[in-house]
Image: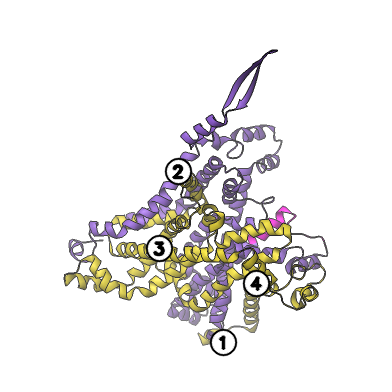
Amino acid sequence: MNNVSDRRSPVLKLFLWSFLILWLILAAFPFFWTFWGSFKVEGDFFSKADWTWALFGHLTQAETGGAFTGDGYHGAWVQEEFWRAAINTFVVVFFTVAISLTIGTLAGYALSRSTYNYAFWLLILALIFRAMPPITLVSGYLLPFYQWNLWGHLPTAIVVLVAINQPFTLWMLTSFFRNIPKDLDESAMVDGCTHFQAFRHVIIPVMWPGVITTGLFSLLLAYNDFVVTAMILSQDNQTMVPKIASFLGTTQTKGNVMFAVASVVSVTAPLFVLVMFFQRQIVSGLTAGAVKG
Amino acid sequence: MPGPLADQTGCMKHKTFFWFILPTSLAMLLFIALPIVSVVMQSMYAPHEQVIVEVESCDIFGCKKSTMVDQDATREIREAEPLGRFVGTEIYTNRNHLATTEIGLAWQQATGFSEFVSALMNLPFYRALAFTLTFTFVVTPLVLILGFMIAVAVNSIPAPLRGPTIFLSLLPMIINTLVGSLILFWMVDARGIVGTLLQTLVGDPNLSMKASTPLTWVMLIVYGVWHAAPFAFVVYYAGLQTVPKDTLESAMMDGASRWEQIRYVIIPHLLPLTTFIALMQLMDNFRVFEPILSFNASAHATSLSYFIYDDLGGETRLLSSAAATSVLTIIGVAILLTPVLIRTWRDFGRK
């Protein structure tokens, strides 16, 4: 590759670099700006008078005595009980990922090993299901859930999220299992194992990289979900993202938009850490479906 | 294709396959397939009207008749038939959905095509459809182009810098749509940093992105591209790693310019990936709705999903109206997917 880049004209190089730097600023700057601003008072973060106030905290100093303040975080987490939403989110995400992966690995393995036509059409059906906007499904849930008193509870949201995530999970896991050589389980079955035993003793020990990658995406889907959790959970069981949306309604009148800013930063921070540690898996997961499918 | 030998060892038997696939199929059947049936049903029933009874009250001056709502009877009938009363396709054709009568009227009265279009844009369903389609078909190509450019640029920088670059580039995609659009929304607020910057650039201290329809659409589209470009970038970047080196080298030997290399070697190599990204983007952009909520933009732009959300979220949940819009949205998705399905069908037949 070196001789390729050497041949490039300096003009082209300059263009590529400036384009890339511009993109990186566009991609990352909003996050750092909001993070920095979340420690200011509203008058600084939204300052009509002078934008540098947001940097140095002119009003924050005047109002609280320091250049930084944790008032937004205190208001959101303690006063508005954001911690409750955080716990709910944790419960929902944990169980959604665990159940999705358990039933998804079984199905993904079977789909990768079956050569019958129906396996192919099942994957196509999953693709069609993947295309359904979740809100259209939610409008189908509401009446039955009211009737059977299922509305508002965390387990309901978990089951629904598991189902909505299945098409995607299936596609990803099937493509991972196809990469595990068939000889492995075939030789186990020649030795007299049933298909399930072969799966348990031979496939499970080698499937973890694919399962972890798929798990990351299930986690992102469950963590980032707004439509299902906003519509199906009651006020007490609300998760973080719908809680932020409800802040927008109530806090803007109170002039406490900084609660929302602080909780937005709180929701984003775990994702930062996640990408930092699992960047390789996320990149490989995004491409797995594309390169093989 | 399975031969008789494959059936004995490698290929999974029907019964085993069934048990492996059962939990997933059950989940998808109960929570994806049945809800679709349920919305179709619901869309043909309207809520019960209140039961009105005529009461005659007599006193010494004579008898008077008055009407009142029979609360008990109303509750009873609503509980007995929670779906409501059957109305067939009435909800589909009413003003909030396909608005057939209104369109017919507008067609007759309109003096020009533009007048007809503006009459159409006053109808909620068509307004939502117009924005949804515009968003889908503007954002998708822009995402492809921007993602490709980033991938080429990242591919040309020294290897040690690529990791951090990819990290920063992934951020807009990885966060929740609602949260991501809020972050941008606060910046373009008239008092936010980008909003103030734009005011200075344009020289109009009262410029507000929120106040005008075209600017709102632009803002939402910019957000859509910002959010989805990393996905296209990562897929293209991975594709660039697998470009056959010898083809590239022989093209260079033949004196192909940089642009010709991209045009005749790299782009054909990335074409299947482009189809994949475009398909995913069409599906995702068609369901756009969280940015409209975050940007508080419903006065200037609504989408099909937002329309459903709005019906479901109000004080009185308009289940039937939401169901009808849902069915229309699902039909839209089906039309969107048809080319893909036809191609799959043909490929499958060829095998």
Q: Please tell me if label 1 and label 3 are on a single chain.
A: yes
Q: Position of residue A150 (x, y in %)?
A: 46, 50
Quick one: label 4 or label 1, which is nearer the N terminus?
Answer: 1
- The shade of chain B is purple
The quarter of the image holding the N terminus of chain B is bottom left
* Residue A6: image tag: 1
Give the residue at x 58% y 40%: B97
Give the residue at x 64% y 34%: B102
| Amino acid type, callout 1 | Asp
From the viewer's side, name the closer residue of B334 and A29.
Answer: A29
Quick one: label 1, few (<14), some, or many (20+) residues within 10 Å? few
Residue B290 shown in magenta:
no
Give the residue at x 70% y 38%: B112
Q: Circle 3 sits on which residue?
A: A100
Q: Is residue A255 left or right of residue B314?
A: right
Q: Which chain is yellow?
A: A
Q: Secondary structure at mark 4?
A: helix
Mark 4 vs mark 3, foreground winner is 3
Q: Secondary structure at mark 1?
A: helix
Q: Position of residue A83 (x, y in %)?
A: 57, 67
The quarter of the image holding the C terminus of chain B is bottom left
Mark 4 vs mark 1, foreground winner is 4
Quick one: label 1 or label 3, which is nearer the N terminus?
Answer: 1
Instruction: Report the Cα–Cα distance between label 3 and label 2.
Output: 24 Å
Instruction: Report the Cα–Cα distance between label 4 and label 1.
Output: 28 Å
| Amino acid type, callout 2 | Ser
The answer to which quarter of the image holds residue A292 is bottom left
Q: Circle 2 sits on which residue?
A: B38
Q: Please tell me if label 4 and label 1 are on a single chain.
A: yes
Q: Circle 4 sits on which residue?
A: A26
From the viewer's side, name the closer residue of B114 and B289.
Answer: B289
